[in-house]
Structures are given as C-alpha cells and as structure tokens.
Image (cartoon, coloured by chain):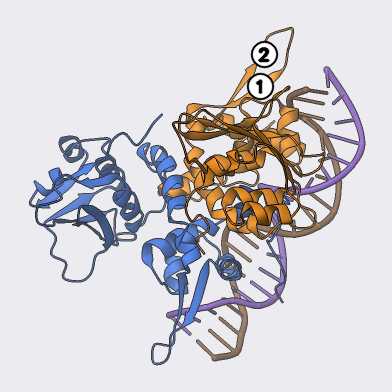
Chain colours: A orange, B blue, C purple, D brown
Amino acid sequence: MHYNRGMRSYGQYCALAKALDVLGDRWTLLIVRELMLRGPSRYTDLRNGLPGIATNLLSERLRELKDAGVVAREEAPPPVATTLFSLTPRGQALRPVLDELGAWGVPFMVEGPAPDDAFRGRWLAWPAERFLTDADPDAPPVSVELRAGDGDGADPVVVETVEGAVRARPAGAGEQPDAVLSGSPHAILGLLSGQIDVAEARRRGVRIDGEERVLARLRPAAALASS
Amino acid sequence: MHYNRGMRSYGQYCALAKALDVLGDRWTLLIVRELMLRGPSRYTDLRNGLPGIATNLLSERLRELKDAGVVAREEAPPPVATTLFSLTPRGQALRPVLDELGAWGVPFMVEGPAPDDAFRGRWLAWPAERFLTDADPDAPPVSVELRAGDGDGADPVVVETVEGAVRARPAGAGEQPDAVLSGSPHAILGLLSGQIDVAEARRRGVRIDGEERVLARLRPAAALASS
DNA sequence: CCGCATCCGGGGCGATACTG
DNA sequence: CAGTATCGCCCCGGATGCGG
C-alpha cells in the first residue's frame, strides 16, 4: 500500500515552494527531462535513460508525477501491449524550466565530465536546440548527426534546421545527414556551445564527415556561459 | 569536521543533472529565493524568511552554495560586526530559473494556501514583478503597497512602475504609495495574477485605500496559468 | 543576540533480489 | 517488461548547546 509517501511539503504559500513540493524530490526533474527529450517512453527505456536510478524510485516518482498531473500513463492495446509514459500539457509546460536550469548548468559541463559520469547522446540534443541558431534561414534546410561517446550511450542525434529554427531529434535508421560529427561528448559540447571553434575541436579529436560547411550555418548563439 | 556531505552527484554528464547536483538538495533553491528577494541578508533574517528550515541545514546549505560559487559571505566590519550573505553573479544568474519555476507553480497558489502554510509578504513581490505590466509607460510613475496576511509575515511590499517596467521592493519607513492593498494573500495574489478582478477581490475581503485608479494601470499580463 | 555545531530519531534514498 | 519487496545507510528534521 502506498499512501502519501514523499509528499513532504515545505508548508509555504509561495509559488516556488509549491512547485518544489511537486518537483523537488530527487530524480523527479531528471525523469521529466527524459520524457521531454524522448517523448512517450516505456518504463525500461526511461530506466536506461536514467543511469543510477533505483527501480523502486522510478516507479514511485512516476506515480507521484501522475497524481500531480504532470505525467500520463497509457496502456497500448495489443498486440504491442506495452505501457507508455508521457508528459501532459502541464508537464510540457516545464520546458522553460528545464531550459533555464540546463542553461545554468552548461558551465559545469564545459569543465568536462567527472571520471565515472554516465552519458547519453540525447542529452546533447537539448543543449543543441537551445544554443544553435540558423545563420541562413532562407537557404535549404541542413542536418547534422552527432555521435558522441562510446557504444553505451551512443544514441545518435540529428540536429536540423526547420523554418529558421534548429531542432534536434533521435536519429532514425538510414539517416542521411549533410555532415556527421563524431568525438568525445566534452569536445562536441564545446563546439555546440561556442566555447571552442572547429579547429580546436579537431585538435581535441572531433571528426567531421560529409560537408563541413554546414557547420558554419549552425552557429552558437551569443554568450551563454556568463560567469 | 565537514567533508563533502550532501554532495551526492547524479553522476551524469548532462547540464541539467550538473545543475541539480548543486541546487537539487532540499531547501537550496528556497535559500536562493530569499537572497534574491531580500538582497544581502543576515543569517537570522534568512532563517525568518524560511519558516520550517532547521538551523543546521541552513548553515550547511550556505556553505555548499559558497563552495559552488553561488553565495558570498562578507563579514561586516565593526561596529556592526554581522555577517552578510549575498548572491554572486553566478547566483544572480539563477533569476530566470526561479522565475520559470515560480510561474509554473502559480496555479498551485491560485488554489489557495494549505491549512498550515506559512506566508511572507515578500513572496508576492516576485510574482508581482513577473505578472504585472505598466499599461501607460509614458505617464508619471505610480506605486502600490501590498499588505497581505496577518502580523507574522506582513512585511509590506511596494510595487512601482520604473521606466515602463514594474518593480517590487520591500516597503521602507514612511512610505507614500498612491494606493494600499490589504487583504488575504490568496485574494491579493488572485488580483495580481489576473485570475479575479477588482470587484471580485473586494468581495473576498480585499481593502483598497488611496487612489484606486492606479490599479487599472498595473495590469496583469496575458494568460499565465495554462492548465 | 547571532551564527553556527552537535546529537539523535525517522524516513527518504540506493542497491539488490524477486515476481506476474 | 514493468514493476514490488526488502534492507541498510545517510540525509533530513527538531532540539539543544555554545562560543563570539
């Protein structure tokens, strides 16, 4: 029987405290991150996208988020017969929160990963959407595939221009990007964020296949890492 | 001796996870809220603005935030001889994060406070800055004082127009606002957020002294509480 | 008074094992 | 595949003490 566990409230009539009553528990915002980046996901895929989480915590948080109206469960009908978790509109409304928190955290990433940090390629998709702009919106669309890290978290990500904006999505099968960036997550993130240029990135082991000039079109926006 | 307590990391090379490594512990973001709303503050004043916090947690969080470069301590010289805590530029950069999180939490406030919720008047200052706009930026500036709640958390707040924007600050002594709003926090917040109009607010016990028409100038911005 | 440090009980959290 | 069950540990909450 699960009563109101984890629902410890700050007991303050304040918008920020109320938000943290729902989102402040450990792992909660990272679960929202995965649902935001992946879209509707199965339990196992969420677990894979959240290295380090305990399975009981994942199920408990998903239940709390469902009760709070942030997450929805939908049972897919046979023959698939799997459960899908997704964000409600109220959950989608957290996008600006994650964007701002992530932007604030970018300087920590620039320092490089800790020795045992886990990594998933799609975690770059979201900084990419935030920091890249299309330098020539009227030209035909371009796309770049990012392959960061080794096999474990190597889900490739495609960054493409869409009507003047830059969007990122998981790479599908038989992808045909204009260019492919391969290298360490650290170096690729430095390139995306504008902290280092193409020459410096290459010096740090980044490999560029395909048409390199499309990189000049996806330019990092202005100063992002204010001290 | 205090080693690296509480520094439990998610161990993920992700901007959001890195941000939460610093800010994700309990009470941390609320401490930043107080420093943001109050400016440089003494330990005791922070404690008063954070009803429910344990004193050891406050000191521990302040130390962690200092180590992370978010908070600075300055020892005021004699004869004052008190310690002041303030936000570094890196801490000030959290303003958009708090704004977005707070905006997301506003719908919970509209539902009204829980039975034993604590309240401080200055918690309205920050939603006010976010949700009010000056409907007539070229006219002479106006100011409204908010007195929400009873004695305990009645720190009055002054909302005023400053060059087309709306700013909030703690009310000083001998304040001369154009109007004064008194009433329950719930009703006043409804008015600020545009959820209820002046007539409805009055029906809910809000009292308006001074020139009522200045309220027409401080208009709530467009829809804020998306379902 | 102000700014903590110390002590202690309870429960959230983390890791593993297990099940329909 | 999608969880539940169980068990330590350490974070958290509350009270008290205490030096400057």
Marking on residue A76:
2
Residue B49 visible, this angle: no
Left or right: where B119 falls relative to B50: left
Left or right: where A13 falls relative to B67: left
Residue A142 visible, this angle: yes
Residue A220 at x, y = what percent? Answer: 53, 48
Marking on residue B187:
none
Left or right: where A99 falls relative to B41: right
- When asked about the image quadrant of residue B145, the answer is bottom left
Residue A94 at x, y = what percent? Answer: 50, 38
| B100 relative to B22, above or below | above
Neighbour tally class for label 2: few under 14, some 14-19, many 20 plus, Cα within 10 Å: few
Q: Please give the name of the residue rendered at 73% of the width and 56% of the height, measured from the top-left corner.
A: A203
- When asked about the image quadrant of residue A171, the answer is top right
| A92 relative to B119, above or below | above
Q: Nearer the viewer, residue B104 or A100?
A: A100
Q: Please give the name of the residue rendered at 31% of the width and 33% of the height, measured from the top-left corner.
A: B223
Residue B43 at x, y = what percent? Answer: 47, 73
Asked which secondary structure carries label 2, the reply is: loop
Residue hosting label 1: A84
Three-letter code, disc 1:
Leu
Quadrant including the N terminus of chain A: top right
Subunit of label 1: A
| B14 relative to A146, above or below | below
Neighbour tally class for label 1: few under 14, some 14-19, many 20 plus, Cα within 10 Å: some
Asked whether disc 1 touches disc 2, contact meaning CB atoms under 8 Å apart, the reply is yes
Left or right: where B146 falls relative to A203: left
